[in-house]
Image: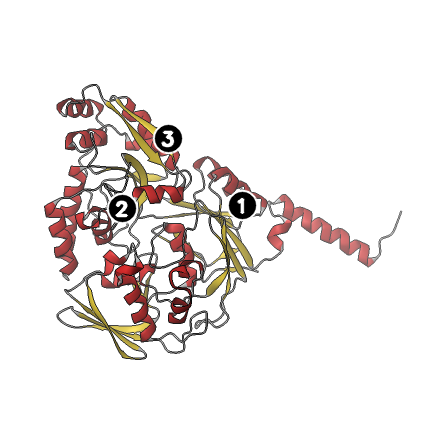
Amino acid sequence: MRRMNAFSLGMVVFVGFLFILNDQGFTKERFSDKDKIVVALSTQILTLDPARSAGTPAEMVRRHLYEGLVYADEQNRIYPLLAHKWEITKDGLIWTFYLRKGVKFHDLTPFTAQAVKKSFDRLLDLATGSNRRYMYTFIDQIKVIDDYTVQFVTKEPRADFLNLLTESGAYPISPAALDKYGKDIGDNPCGTGPYKLEKKVTGEYVVLTPFDNYWKGKPKLSEIKFITVSEEATRVNMIENGEADFIVNVPPQDIKRLEADKSITIRKDQSNRVAHVGLNVKRPPFDNLKVRQALNYGVDRELIIKGVCNGLGIPAKSIIAPATWGYAPVSPYKYDPEKAKELLAQAGYAKGFKAKLWTPQGRYFRDKETALAVAGQLRKIGVDLDVEIIDWGQYLKELKLGLNEGNKVEAYMLGWESVTGEASYIINTIFASKNVSPTGWNTMFYANKRLDEINEIASKTMDDKKRADLFKEAQDIAVKEAAWIPLYVYEQVNAHRFDLKGIRVLPFEASVFNDAYIKK
């Protein structure tokens, strides 16, 4: 019998250890570069310019590069960040923020009140062409009191000002970087966040590395690579074979299998995103209220949730999700195909009609599948929707065209969230007539005088009870006038390697890795 020396015996034990690990679903890749992670997103990261909204994937990445004066946690509670405290005058018109000292931008420019003012001046300048400007037009002027005190003077009281400051449009940018890069700041981001840009290939990936001079201390991951992987199956394969450490939108059919893999954690978090079909109310037949209401009665939301989403959602009873402050369940619509046919007949479409239904693929949880299911159900009431899949970047461009700019939208699948965590964001951004495309995101071209009044009154109302009542009325109007077919509010289902800890998953579908680490 051959005897083993200590080295040989040690090698056998080591190889056996690796075999056990691989048998449990681990791979060699998981044990190399342990402090580097790959995050597989469903759609492109279009721009890193905070002044330009470009979908949640871009918003997610920006939250590692930039920071706001304040931030909101997973329950939408607001805390100090770059401002360590603030004050508001009794009339609600002047907000004074006291800034942290010793904070630097990635180019080592000091963070000061002047930097805050310059960023907001740029955001509000019409020449910038920001598609987030409309959110901040209530600001009258920004005053630099001293290097670490900045004051916002508003034209009117603004109840949601702190909420608005939590979204990336309000994130300060290095003034030196703005001077250097100008309109190209989207490819050369420079914030105060824990990570800085290492490399960006538009449409493919973004690589972030630690900012050594971060004011809270150097972050624990040595690299975060965000990559675009639109195909669900490919993302699943990547998490299983170790090519990705975090993936979004796990398909329902793969959840149980991934849960059985000890090297993978399935994470389910609440969402404030409402999956819906938007309707261009300026284009026949969607300009007819009875047609829009008929479509709402013609959709079986429960069946879609059960069959398409595998039960991972709840029927939408408003244009706003329950996790959003100000939500009210107001929807009168239940699946009633006979009522739908009756309304179509009253509208002059007894024989139905044909139209196009646009959808992205892989951007939202079961988006294409949901669009096909909606089309299949509406076919039963005589409505023939031709489902057309459009690339995400092109999708946003087409939706944002004005009526006189070649807009071809008829019906489209989207999932709107409240990035600020409260109802006014949805009501103002999507349903206010002043914010129709291309100004804002009212891509339905919807207008209602009373809803517009509520939008203006609620923004100035500091009493939460009165604001909530106003929001309920606005939701009731929007649901009854049916510029949307609200479908469901879905759970966020993501997967990550078992030892990746410290991930924050925000309700608007952004996962943040600023505090993430690999548990040794």
Q: Is mark 1 on a helix, strand or loop?
A: helix
In the rendered image, the residue lying farthest to the bottom is 146
The residue under the point 23% across, 37% down is: 280
The relative height of residue 399 versus residue 304 in the rendered view (above or below) is: below
Q: Does 274 sit left or right of 104 as displayed?
A: left
Q: Disc number at residue 321?
A: 2
Q: Does 313 sit left or right of 235 as displayed?
A: left
Under mark 2, the amino acid is Ala
Under mark 3, the amino acid is Gly
Let me know if residue 505 appears in the view: no
Q: Does 474 sit left or right of 183 as displayed?
A: left
**Category of crowding for the residue at label 1, using alpha-carbon neighbours closer than 10 angstroms: few (below 14), some (14–19), many (at least 20):** many
Q: Are marks 2 and 1 in contact (CB under 8 Å)?
A: no
Q: Does 513 sit left or right of 18 as displayed?
A: left
Q: For marks 2 and 3, give the CA distance.
A: 21 Å
Let me know if residue 185 appears in the view: yes
* Mark with earlier residue (2, 1): 1
From the viewer's side, name the closer residue of 129 and 157: 129
Residue identifier under label 1: 239
